[in-house]
Amino acid sequence: MEYRGYDSAGIALVNNGKLNIYKKKGKVAILEESNIGEDLNGTIAIGHTRWATHGEPSDRNAHPHQSAGGSLAIIHNGIIENYGSIKEELTAKGYTFNSDTDTEVLLNFIEDIRKNNECSLEEALRIALKRIVGAYCILIVDQQDPDTILAARKGSPLVIGIGKGEHFLASDATPIIEYTKEVVYVNDYQIAIVKRDELVLKNLGNERETPFITRLDMELAAIEKGGYQHFMLKEIFEQPGTIYDCLRGRLQPEHGLITMGGVDAYLENLVKAQRIIIVACGTSWHAGLVAEYMIEEYCRIPVEVEYASEFRYRNPVINPGDVIIAISQSGETADTLVALENAKEKGAIIFGVVNAVGSSIARMSHAGAYTHSGPEIGVASTKAFTGQLAVLNMMALKIAYAKGTIDPEVYHSLLTELNQIPDKVAQILKNTDAIKAIAEKYAGASDFLFLGRGYNFPVALEGALKLKEISYIHAEGYPAAEMKHGPIALVDENLPVVFVATRDRFYEKIVSNVQEIKARKGKIICIVTEGDTHIPAMADDVIFVPDTPEALGPMLSVVPLQLLSYYTGLAKGIDVDKPRNLAKSVTVE
Ligand code: F6R
């Protein structure tokens, strides 16, 4: 679970009427060390890794938090937006607080309701949840009740694993598969009362709801490092297999067919769509940009690619029948989720391109296509990105063919080429020594520029994002031609400039852009197509990728950039799976 946040960690155990809480700033390993010799027995326990929102990372702000009366402990993902006014009310009643968190306020609010109403903890929780505004997944234990964990969610995910005489609660399914494959995804506004042998789900009106049990199709090996030094490296190297898994059963080049259940079910809507809006964040947003180029080129449908966080707040024009494609690895990104809920209310058709099976976005979409990349544990997204591109490529080709906007010959050849992508990625991964050497050579740089044109422009953005996340080097991605309108002022002999310059229709243009940087003494690193001799003659360093049609190129050209950032982070001694300030799923807005 540690990929959810690693600025502090803590656990609370209830044992025989005793509540023991241990928490520490820093990673789980630090908590573990500090726990040696402590009493770690319990019949129920809760644990949390934090990504700070309210209050700096510190021992006192780490979860679990204990109630003022001392008998309750809570862990919480999310943000309680109206905690300020509740805190004022409680302070006026004499409550004092040991942390700066919204979570401690929520717990004391619940305790106060229980005391005033002389009701059960469950009832107090229900009353409190009706008053609070914000997003939450909370777990609460009471030292008086050593067999019950109370849980509730709104906006932040919660999964319950059903074992034999035991239950497991987590914010996603991956840590549970070690113990059981049967899980229940808790819905918004549900409360779970979890005992050793019993799981009761209720709504906020105190009515029971039937838990829907899902069987996980995931193996333990998928969440282990499998001999690699880091998850990120493992996941980069998994890509031939994960892209293949994504295409498998869908792409049949020999029959000119693409079978995708979700797309088939909504094909008419997609073909008739007057416009498509793509909503995503971060790396997934970059995948959306590639899709924009492809859908506009082959389907002739106007596409807008939106940052979910902006889209949700700017009152966008959405007409019934508009198609929204949501792209998300985790399927839990808060901004994307809420943006979709708003659009759904306005009559849009929501199509999810999601990796995490059973996640909130997957469940709220009208239709969708999983990327089948397997659990992505490394904080920097790698295999999920190429999986997203594979799905979006297939979707675009399928819609274009149904719409008659693609030349059938081009369609058939793209299908054949797409089928060869896994092998070509494997070829890139055969020798990564050159990329490692380049990373080590430039690891001391303070800035990087990434440039590309056409389909390679989003790849340049992605390369810059990866480098920032994993090496803490400031990097900017830019359209290569736009550089002369400003960023070129940054270029001097100390600036490494990465060109994504594979053979495509802009090749001659990007050659001119390379010349412009060379004339200003920038250090030139180029990703080029095998066999190219022209650009390598101008560059300081070169990485070759196999040839492929330009629309499919990003799935190849991004791989060396993933490795470049990985090896740069490694050279700088950074924990690449847990870079500072980041969390894998951003479930707060
Ligand atoms: C970058 C990265 C983030 C995510 C973004 C969206 O390496 O991992 O930028 O892409 O937070 O996350 P998902 O795709 O889970 O919605």
Image (spheres, rainbow, N blue to C red):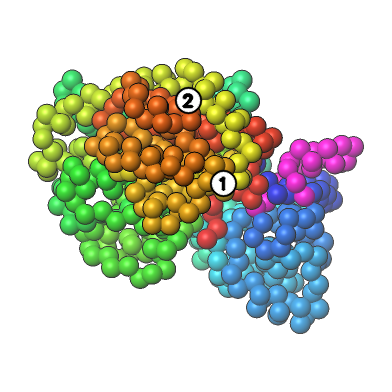
Tell us which disc is closer to us: 2 or 1: 1
Residue 10 place in picture, x, y as percent: 75, 48
Kindly indicate the quadrant of the structure image that contains residue 143. Answer: bottom right
Q: Residue at x 55, y 66 (%)?
A: 134
Q: Cβ of disc 1 within 8 Å of ligand 1?
A: no
Q: Residue at x 36, y 35 (%)?
A: 501
Q: Residue at x 29, y 27 (%)?
A: 548
Answer left or right for 137 relative to 556. right
- Label 2 vs 1, first from the N-terminus: 2
In the rendered structure, find residue 196 and report the number of the disc placed on it.
none
Kindly indicate the quadrant of the structure image that contains residue 105. Answer: bottom right
State the residue in front, 99 or 358: 99
Q: Which residue is mark 1?
A: 447
Query: Which amino acid, mark 1?
Result: Asp
Q: Residue 183 colored magenta?
A: no
Q: Give the secondary structure at mark 2.
A: loop
State the residue in front, 366 or 498: 498
Answer left or right for 552 relative to 167. left
Q: How packed is label 2: few (under 14 Cα within 10 Å), some, or many (20 or more)?
A: many
Q: Residue at x 21, y 37 (%)?
A: 397
Q: Which residue is mark 2?
A: 238
